Amino acid sequence: MENFLHYILFFILSSSIFCLVFSYFIYPILLQFLAKNKTRNSIIYQANESLPNISVLMSLYNEEKVILKKLESLYHQDYPKENYQVFIGSDHSSDQTNSIITTFIQENNIDNFHFSPFKIRQGKPGVINQLVKKAKEKYGNKNHIFISTDASVILNNNVLFHLAKHFKNEQIGLVDSNLKHTGIETEGISKSEDNYISKEVQIKNNESLYSGKMMGPFGACYAIRSELYKPVPSNYLVDDFYLSMHVLDQGKDVINDLDAICYESVSQHMDEEFRRKARISAGNFQNLATYLHLLNPLRGKIAFNFLSHKVLRWLGPFFILASFFSNFFLLFQNNLFYFILFTFQAILIFFIPIFDWILQKLNINIGVLRTIRYFFVMNLALLKGFFNYFKGIKSNVWQPTKRPD
């Protein structure tokens, strides 16, 4: 019986560590090998061709600090004005957002920008669902391209073209942009967050190249065929992933384009990012429940990417807990290996995050320590998000993350 318990604990310990190492290290390396010598979609529109019609959809709430710059980046897009419309929905903003938008449209005499100031807060998916109806009315329900973008994200002037060009290929259902961060500083978590997002861009790009089954856009700016858009349930928190998985479920491809560059200031504060990650985590588990069937091995590359890139990471907090506590009980085996491993885990999970927090208070910033702390705090946010999902989510309305001006 004692040997059996030892084997069970060892299996929990080793499999938990393997799942974490596989998702964060082995899978990205494997993707680089699988994507090697693969070429991006080549069935694209050229700049001199007749380009598809676009509806840009933007939901916003209290974005007075960034909205003018955002509007200018949309207005100056290198895309035929007659081929794109911009639909903006203000989710009952209480600052100067609405007046800034109205003034900008009037002063520039813009006829392809349409503004809807909603009087009741309903969350981003609710606003986008209504903007979709307005866009379809404008184009008479003809199939075209929706581009969803956040107010805080500034676009290069060729982003619309680089996103839309891929839809000449009938197999392409959704195209993501290439998000880059600005405002990176030493003091906060911006370097850790930027490093994480940069690695995510690489992973998603390799998923695009080798399989065409990229696991979710960033949500900052992406394009989707209008006929593949599915109204997002009113209480769902992560609409972009919900839509991208629906596209894959319909047999179409989801890819990214590194030339479609956009910029967003990165979060500096651990508590703000914790709140955002916990919200996203709850939404992730909503999507997992909805698209659990895509983990069926018969779905091939979709199932492999979904499990390796997303599900194993979402379950990361449970693997960390399972690894730590199974290792704790294995200490009674009086084995030096288990003692060393447990000490190593305790240092990573507890000592380093606390030590880095103290150093930050003293205005001492050490990159590797901040990154380790960031990793475990964000996994704690994943755990909190799971319990929020378990308790039930009634609304997707939330306060945007505070970012540098």
Image (cartoon, rainbow, N blue to C red):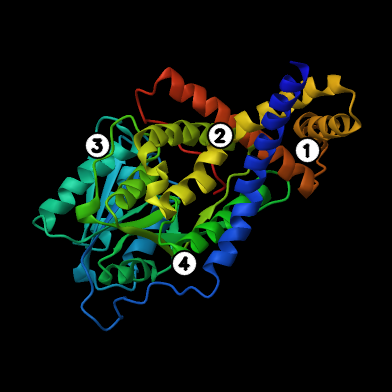
Q: Which residue is mark 3?
A: 118
Mark toward the start of the polypeptide (3 vs 1): 3
Disc 2 versus disc 4: distance between alpha carbons?
Answer: 26 Å
Crowding at dot 3, Cα within 10 Å, few <14 / some 14-19 / many 20+, comes out as few
Specify whether 21 is left or right of 137.
right
Q: Is residue 183 visible?
A: no
Disc on the earlier residue, 4 or 3: 3
Q: Amino acid at mark 4?
A: Leu
Q: Secondary structure at mark 3?
A: strand
Q: Report, in whole angstroms, how far the alpha carbon at label 4 lies from the one at label 1.
A: 40 Å
| Marking on residue 315 | 2
* Residue farthest bottom in this picture: 48
Residue at the disc numbered 1: 360
How far apart are the alpha carbons under marks 2 and 3?
37 Å
Q: Secondary structure at mark 1?
A: helix
Q: Position of residue 267 (x, y in %)?
A: 58, 45
Residue for point 26% across, 72% down: 168
Quadrant location of residue 8?
top right
Name the element at disc 2: loop
Residue 360 seen in the current view: yes
- Foreground mark, 4 or 3, reads 4
- Residues at circles 4 and 1 in contact by the CB criterion of under 8 Å: no
Numbered label attached to residue 209: 4
Eye-nearest disc, 3 or 1: 1
Residue visible at 37% across and 46% down? 240
Earlier residue among tags 2 and 4: 4
Amino acid on which disc 3 is placed: Phe
Residue 180, image x, y percentages? 54, 59
* Disc 2 to disc 1, C-alpha distance: 29 Å
Q: Is residue 197 left or right of residue 365?
A: left
Vertical comparison of 224 with 9: above or below = below
Q: Marks 4 and 3, Cα distance to the nearest angstrom?
A: 40 Å
